Amino acid sequence: MAECLVVVGGGAAGFFAAIAAAEANPSARVLLLEKSAQYLGKVRISGGGRCNVTHSCFDPRELVEFYPRGGQELLGPFTRFACGDTMEWFEDRGVELKVESDGRVFPVSDNSETIIQCLESMADAAGVSRETQSGLKNLVRLDSGMWRVELESGASIDADRVLLAPGSSKKIWDVLSGLGHRIVPPVPSLFTFNIRDPRLAELSGVSVSNVRVTVPVGGLETEGPLLITHWGLSGPAVLKMSAFGARWMADQDHRFTMYVNWLPQFEAEDLIEELNSLRKDVSHQRKRVLSNAMFGIPLRLWRSLGAFARIPESANWSDLSKPQLRKWAEVLTESAFTVVGKSTNKDEFVTAGGISLSEVSFSTMESRVVSGLYFAGEVLDIDALTGGFNFQAAWTTGWIAGHAMAGSPI
Ligand SMILES: Cc1cc2nc3c(=O)[nH]c(=O)nc-3n(C[C@H](O)[C@H](O)[C@H](O)COP(=O)(O)OP(=O)(O)OC[C@H]3O[C@@H](n4cnc5c(N)ncnc54)[C@H](O)[C@@H]3O)c2cc1C
């Protein structure tokens, strides 16, 4: 009788795994079970509806740096299937891709439906049987070594091997705990910081191309573009910090003090010297400080920071006293903000936490606790920065797990 391979979860990881398994073992019966009414829900909304499929980062050692959790474990898998392979996979199947200036990869159509149609038609072509509204309720190991997949409908399926790709799912993590797996408690990652501060009022939409953000007590530091929003601060520097500090920030209930250096090319002392030389420069002396933004800082932000440093509206550079220069340099390099909570980053968010990685073999994605059980995607304690890296983890782990469960490891 044909082997029965069950993949649980019709998201990016589940589809990729099911296709890989069915293509690698055409004689097996591959069944893809999705709890909700539609497949690939997150792919549909991803990247603002455009689906940032992967990133044009082709060196596995560089690639793993984008994973606050799971980077070390993914190094081996990325030498076998990484961003270039994902691009080739989709392009070979008729999806034209483009690389944007920041390295993110999207379908040329700018429409996530292109990716969904490709995955669905490839699953059908490979002979994957798929079912929506078919949620897994429990998994039981039978004496025969087979797995009994119990569904929410009350039905059950006996499978030779099972692959779990349900994303962040408390229910599945509970089932896995029951089988002896350790689950790292889930916390949100990739969020923006809520800050109520008069310096930022009226500045929503203003962005700065490069700042340094630090949270000394958490040992956190990032650099990159910053965006001021209605609720506080966002942009790559903040999102990156939210990912690397996800667990520490959850422990603080997302309340802490952060510092922004608006001019990361300067430390406070160097900037005092720079401002002092501006004060002495004849071409600057008669210029109003607050009317002439410098160093690429947007004028509205410059004025707001200047007001906080108590620079008078009418002051010229030559009017500034040494203490005023000192205060001005401090505000420009060490603005303290009180974070009072977090907001969802609508473009992309993920959960840190999941199946403990030490209990998974990354050569096959098989459980080290119970045999015949495989994992792929966000159900694992793996997450990444924004930019296509989260999908890449789903494609890579799905590809490896799918081949391994089909009896044809790569
Ligand atoms: C708004 C948003 C935008 C994003 N944009 C991007 C992006 O552009 N690029 C990027 O790299 N990442 C992006 N991400 C992250 C990315 O979507 C996830 O990393 C990725 O979807 C994880 O894939 P997965 O298959 O592991 O899980 P999911 O996509 O969550 O899929 C899991 C599937 O399993 C199903 N399921 C759950 N429980 C059961 C059960 N008991 N039985 C059967 N089925 C079950 C779920 O319904 C779901 O369909 C975005 C995330 C969000 C929220």
Image (cartoon, grey):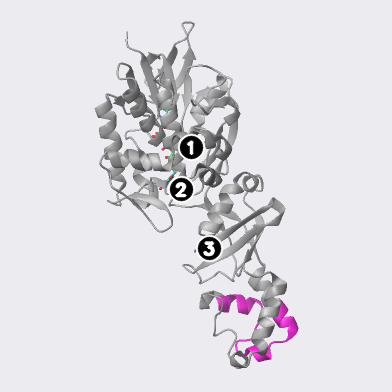
Residue labelled with disc 3: 226
**Residue lying farthest top?**
144
Q: Few, some or many C-alpha atoms within 10 Å of disc 1 (few <14, some 14-19, many ≥20)?
A: many
| In the rendered image, the vertical position of residue 41 relative to residue 123, given as above or below | below
Residue 80 lies in the magenta-colored region? no
If you read the primary sequence from the N terminus, does the residue marked by circle 1 or circle 2 appear first? 2
| In the rendered image, the vertical position of residue 118 relative to residue 220, given as above or below | above
Magenta-drawn stretch, dominant element (helix, strand or loop): helix
Residue labelled with disc 1: 78
Residue 324 lies in the magenta-colored region? yes
Q: Is mark 2 within 8 Å of ligand 1?
A: no
Q: Which residue is at 43% across, 57% downward?
A: 102
Residue labelled with disc 2: 57
- Quadrant containing ligand 1 reads top left
Amino acid at circle 2: Cys
Q: Is residue 78 visible?
A: yes
